[in-house]
Amino acid sequence: MADIAELVDRLGGMAQKQQLVALGARDLDLTLAVRGGRVIRARQGWYSTLAEDDPRVRAVRVGGRLTGISAVIAAGGWVLGRHPLHVSVHDNAARLRTPSNRFVQLAKRHVKGLALHWDDGGVARRGTATSVDLRDALVRVVLDEEFETAVAALDWAVHTGRIDRMDFERIFAHLPRNRRAIREWVDGRCESLPESLTRTRLRMLGHDVDIQVRLGDLERIDLVVDDCVGIETDGREFHESRFEEDRTKDLDITTAGLHPLRPSANMVFRKWDRIVLAVERAIAARAPACSCGNSGTGVAHPLKKPVFPARSAWRKSAIPEFPKPAGNKGRGGALALG
């Protein structure tokens, strides 16, 4: 008797019946495994050892695979907040089901909490049983998500080595021209989501932002803003045991002639206005002594965050152009693949 759960695990937690049959599974084995709760039937002919509410199971239950920001989340990418379930289905897909119940037909293409993407055979041939290829997912992120969210996803993919230089170029070859300017905002040296968001948001306000600036022989500052402010973006999991080291580093930043700021990740996520105020006050106080890239007020370049249309009203022709970069002393970010 075949151990169905073991076979499914070996295939990544999701498997089609024909794959299992090829490995020696019988119909009786499959039935007993489902009845015994060792596997679930995600969809007719699909078996899984993942949890019922796992996004990968929900995507397969619909009749497709994770794509866009959902695929990035499943891969461990840097993503803030909650997002709809993005599912890629073949452009001739039929008999789609709801994410929560494989017996209920999906009557509409737009369902609350679900974003369907009808993709061609090229997308269908790449990826895994539960997710499209990461390159295809990132193209979808740039098309669908807010600017800073797209930058963070690309920062993560480059920094962690999930995509290489060739992959990066392939992604941009699949983007419309008015989206390709985002490449100048991506930097593979970025080490975390709060660092990525802080860098992008300050650049959107017109500040010059350098990244991973050398401090002495061994240390680096996460971000230096307008040659005036040194920002360390702290996550509790990485800095809780580094209290003395972090305080010493703040002294070193001050000694280097910069104003040190150490906002937590939570502050970046939820108290951004207060960070902006602190940065601008620090720049204003130090402006006479700084060789700032702009006036030191943070508003010399009136860039605005692009406003995206509602997903239900999305049209390629309606997508606004991404902004051109204003200040960025860490130039060539997209090509800094390590």
Image (cartoon, rainbow, N blue to C red):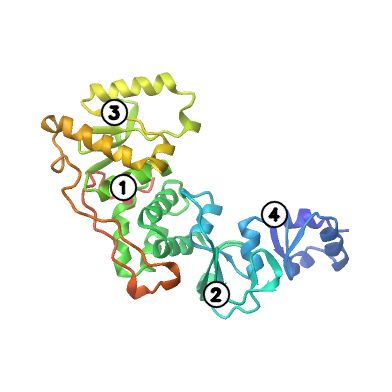
Q: Amino acid at mark 2?
A: Arg
Q: Amino acid at mark 4?
A: Leu
Query: Would residue 328 be found to the left or right of residue 73 on screen?
Result: left
Closer to the camera: disc 4 or disc 2? Answer: 2
Separation of residues labelled 2 and 3 (CA atoms): 50 Å
Which residue in the structure is indicated by mark 2?
109
Q: Which mark is residue 50?
A: 4
Q: Amino acid at mark 1?
A: Arg
Tag 3 or tag 4, which sits nearer the N-term? 4
Q: Amino acid at mark 3?
A: Pro
For disc 4, the neighbor class at 10 Å (few under 14, some 14 to 19, many from 20) is some
| Residue 130 position by quadrant | bottom right
| Residue 284 position by quadrant | top left
Q: Is residue 228 visible?
A: no
Q: Position of residue 336 (x, y in %)?
A: 33, 48
Which residue in the structure is indicated by mark 1?
201
Q: Position of residue 295 (x, y in %)?
A: 13, 42
Closer to the camera: disc 4 or disc 1? Answer: 1
Separation of residues labelled 4 and 1 (CA atoms): 37 Å
